[in-house]
Image: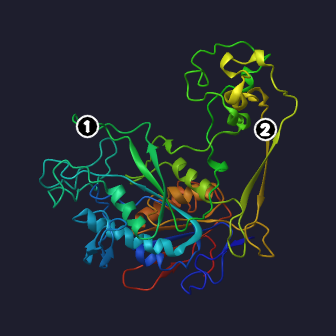
């Protein structure tokens, strides 16, 4: 059995040495305490969604948050947030919430490899969204009878926020992380194609959330091929070559008035290989029967993991293998006679003619893919596994996606009930689901406040 570079390495409270292949670690406790159990640069990818500010009380026990100083954005003087005890997301002001996120992601930055990436799913909230007054903590969801822990913390007015203001929490958070040395590389829009309706008449219904891609350094692992999306049809699709069956071409995306007018660069464009993924991801919400009210779809986590990790890694240092794609021209598709091209695509004289001279020579490509190591370790046979971390594990969506894709994982959550839910959902414990991922090694730990880590041997994991 192979191994990956050490989550838990050199920590007496966990594994001695390295994690085995198929290892999944579940930690119950305050996120700051749990992250301190992980060694430096031991995680390849982080996919997480923290509790949103002012939206929901998850019924978690209050935890102590230390004083923190952070800059709200690059070039702005720092703020000092005092120590506080409570649940993340129920802070009295958004500045305190952002400060606590900065604290968490400082620890995440420590455990993330230099070539790793952070994918942060985060939504927004409104100031004074209701009519005021106390919230009924006993209200239940219609049709299920489940209690909704929905005592909203942002009922009331705060300095600088007007009633009905959109708070802008996602951008407040990422600007603070950017000022804290993170590289902000992309803001992906997660478009919920089946979003829930809202009883509002004076603004649009919210149908999106942000997925921010942040990195620890300017050079990092990213597999664009793994997350390519289907390309739109263009002039050189084989369906439009001479001899193809006649078809109605009006309104096709390559037509004269469309965005894909032919030019010399299109000679090497091959629609059969897809295109680089765009920054708007249309992913529907998924139904979830468990007692968790903020579960993002597994497809969202899978896309992040596919882009940020490799199916092969060095068993010694954990370096991911790099995908190499070689392209070769297909034979048997000679340049097309000029009379077969539209009038605006034929050979012309002058400078414009030079740009379009070979417009009919496109013949497609053959793609050969292989994997290449990125380190010089002598025993690098690619048998290692990349490690995915979710410091706010919840129902275990990220862990389940990592297991499905053959990656190791670390799950952290403060609520034991959610951890048990995640174990059942991942098929790692006898119950409603079978053990889908045998033979997987897993370990459950609990980190009580102000105490050392406590271990529970389960699933065949070593002491």
Residue 146's disc number: none
Give the residue drawn at x 27%, y 68%. 96
Left-right relation of 423 to 200? right
- Residue farthest toward the front in the current orientation of the protein: 350
Q: Residue 171: in sight, yes or no? A: yes
Disc 1 from disc 2: Cα separation: 48 Å
Quadrant of image for the C terminus: bottom right
The label nearer to you, 1 versus 2, is 2
Residue 11 spot, x, y in % from top left: 56, 85
Check disc 1 and report its element: helix, strand or loop: loop
Residue 46 spot, x, y in % from top left: 52, 63
For residue 10, above or below residue 423: below
Give the residue drawn at x 27%, y 49%. 140
Left-right relation of 394 to 69? right
Residue placed most toward the observer, 165 or 64 = 165
Label 1 belongs to which residue? 203
Which comes before the other along the chain, label 1 or label 2?
Answer: 1
Give the residue drawn at x 36%, y 60%. 51
For residue 413, above or below residue 268: below
Residue 460 spot, x, y in % from top left: 64, 73
Q: How crowded is mark 1: few (under 14 residues within 10 Å), some or many (20 or more)?
A: few
Residue 236 spot, x, y in % from top left: 71, 27
Residue placed most toward the observer, 6 or 23 = 6
Q: Residues within 10 Å of mark 2 (few under 14, many from 20)?
A: some
Left-right relation of 323 to 421? right
**Image quadrant assignment for residue 367:** top right
**Image quadrant assignment for residue 275:** top right
Check disc 2 and report its element: helix, strand or loop: strand
Label 2 belongs to which residue? 365
């Amino acid at each position: 059995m192979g191994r990956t570079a050490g989550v838990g390495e050199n920590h007496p409270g966990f594994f001695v040495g390295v994690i085995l292949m198929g290892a999944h670690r579940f930690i119950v406790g305050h996120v700051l305490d749990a992250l301190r159990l992980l060694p430096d640069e031991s995680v390849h990818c982080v996919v997480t969604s923290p509790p949103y500010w002012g939206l929901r009380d998850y019924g978690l026990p209050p935890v102590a948050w230390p004083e923190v100083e952070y800059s709200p954005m690059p070039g702005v003087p720092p703020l000092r947030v005092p120590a506080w005890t409570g649940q993340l997301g129920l802070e009295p002001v958004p500045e305190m919430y952002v400060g606590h996120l900065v604290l968490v992601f400082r620890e995440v930055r420590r455990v993330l490899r230099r070539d790793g990436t952070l994918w942060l799913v985060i939504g927004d909230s409104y100031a004074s969204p209701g009519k005021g007054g106390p919230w009924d903590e006993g209200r239940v969801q219609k049709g299920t009878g489940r209690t909704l822990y929905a005592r909203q913390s942002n009922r009331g007015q705060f300095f600088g926020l007007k009633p009905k203001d959109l708070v802008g929490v996602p951008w407040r958070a990422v600007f603070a992380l950017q000022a804290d040395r993170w590289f902000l590389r992309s803001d992906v829009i997660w478009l919920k194609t089946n979003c829930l309706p809202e009883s509002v008449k004076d603004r649009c219904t919210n149908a999106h959330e942000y997925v921010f891609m942040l990195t620890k350094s300017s050079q990092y692992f990213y597999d664009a091929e793994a997350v390519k999306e289907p390309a739109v049809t263009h002039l050189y699709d084989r369906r439009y070559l001479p001899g193809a069956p006649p078809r109605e071409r009006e309104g096709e995306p390559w037509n004269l008035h469309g965005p894909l007018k032919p030019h010399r660069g299109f000679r090497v464009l091959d629609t059969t290989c897809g295109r680089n993924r765009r920054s708007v991801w249309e992913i529907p919400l998924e139904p979830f029967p468990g007692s968790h009210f903020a579960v993002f779809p597994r497809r969202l986590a899978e896309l992040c993991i596919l882009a940020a990790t490799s199916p092969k890694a060095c068993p010694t240092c954990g370096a991911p293998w790099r995908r190499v794609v070689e392209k070769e021209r297909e034979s048997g598709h000679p340049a097309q006679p000029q009379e077969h091209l539209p009038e605006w695509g034929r050979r012309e004289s002058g400078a414009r003619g030079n740009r379009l001279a070979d417009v009919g020579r496109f013949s497609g490509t053959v793609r050969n893919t292989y994997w290449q190591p990125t380190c010089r370790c002598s025993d690098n046979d690619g048998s290692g596994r990349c490690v995915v971390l979710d410091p706010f594990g919840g129902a275990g969506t990220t862990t389940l996606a990592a297991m499905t894709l053959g990656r190791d994982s670390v799950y952290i959550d403060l609520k034991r009930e959610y951890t048990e839910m995640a174990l059942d959902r991942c098929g790692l414990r006898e119950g409603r689901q079978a053990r889908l991922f045998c033979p997987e090694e897993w370990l459950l730990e609990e980190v009580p406040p102000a105490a050392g880590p406590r271990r529970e041997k389960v699933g065949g994991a070593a002491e």
